[in-house]
Structures are given as structure tokens and as C-alpha cells.
Image: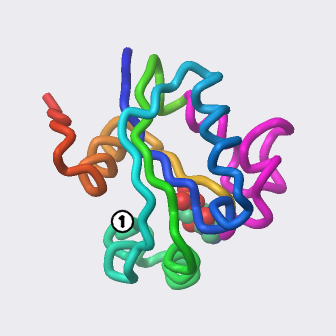
Amino acid sequence: AIERTLSIIKPDAVAKNVIGKIYQRFEDAGLKIIASKMVHLSEVEAGQFYAVHKERPFFKDLVSFMISGPVMIQVLEGEGAIAKNRDLMGATDPKKAAPGTIRADFAESIDANAVHGSDAPETAAVEVAFFFPGMNVYSR
Ligand code: CMP
């Protein structure tokens, strides 16, 4: 099915100047960038976005990292976009990410891991609506 997924290029990858290289991978995989914006998140926004992780030991570090610099946020659309984007990203921990994936090539650590991508249709809808509330995503 044609899906939409929320993708974030995190502060480490933005600082490395590899937005274009990462966009190229999305496009080469047949994913369309149908919305995008660069944002320097506030602590409140980052905490709300990652609210599901609130009780995890890494939550505080995650929020401080995500507000350490601007991020590039986009909606990707295409056939099986959610799984396709996760394949492109590789494992959360770059040390475990398969060669040739975004995290293997551009990430340094599990915290500074270059990209975020929605993990399921339900979270994708919530995450897209969080950053692009005008996108008319209807769950039915
Ligand atoms: P992301 O896909 O953005 O979702 C939550 C983030 O928390 C994750 O990528 C990692 O960057 C970060 N994180 C730090 N430690 C962990 C951990 N032990 N397990 C999962 N995510 C972690």
C-alpha cells in the first residue's frame, strides 16, 4: 500500500552537512518527499514528540540531543514507505546497522544516530500530524 511516514534528520546529520545525501537515498528508493521543514525544536516539542519514551532511562539525553541544533523534518510517501524508510535507516544502534544504511554511514552512537523514522502505521499518522497538522491524514 502507498504509505506516509515521518522522517527526521537529527542534529548530528544536519551538522555534518549530509541532508542532501540522505534525501538522495530516499528518492533513489522511490520515496517522495511530500512535505519538509527545518526546525530548531524546543524542549517541550521534543518531549511531546518522544512522549512514548518518557519513562525510559535515555529520555532526558534524547531530548537534550534533539534540541542541540536544527533538525530537518519530512514526510515520505511511497509503496511500503514505513518499512522502506526503516530499511534505509538501519538499526537504531549504528554499531548494529547493516553496511550501506544511513546510520551505518552517517551515525556515531545510539543517541546521535542521524535519523528517526516512524515504526508503524499508527505512529506514522500521529507523528505526521504532530509536525504537519495540515496534512489531512485520515485514519479509517
Ligand atoms: P529514534 O528512532 O529517534 O527513537 C528514540 C531514540 O532514542 C532512538 O532513535 C535513539 O536515538 C535514542 N535511544 C537512546 N538510547 C536508546 C535505547 N537504549 N533504545 C532505543 N533508543 C535509544
Image-quarter location of ligand 1: bottom right
Classify 136 as above or below 111.
above
Asked if the stretch drawn in magenta spans residue 57, the answer is no
Q: Position of residue 114 (x, y in %)?
A: 66, 57
Q: Which residues are magenta?
A: 84-112
Residue shown at the point (15%, 37%) measured from the top left: 136
Q: Is residue 95 above or below residue 11?
A: above
Residue at horizontal 78 percent and vertical 46 percent from the top? 97
Q: Is residue 86 magenta?
A: yes
Does residue 57 appear in this view?
A: no
Q: Reply above or below: 71 against 76.
A: below
Q: Secondary structure at mark 1?
A: helix
34 left or right of 83 in image: left
Q: Position of residue 32 (x, y in %)?
A: 46, 26
Q: Could you say which is closer to the camera, residue 58 or residue 6?
A: 6
Q: 67 left or right of 35?
A: right
Question: Is 136 drawn above or below residue 16 in the view shown?
Answer: above
Residue type pointed to by label 1: Phe
Q: Where is residue 78, by image quadrant? A: top left
Residue 4 visible somewhere in the drawing:
yes
Locate residue 66, reporting x and y percent.
Answer: 52, 73
- Quadrant of the drawing holding the C terminus: top left
- Where does the image place residue 35, in percent across and percent down from the top left? 36, 40
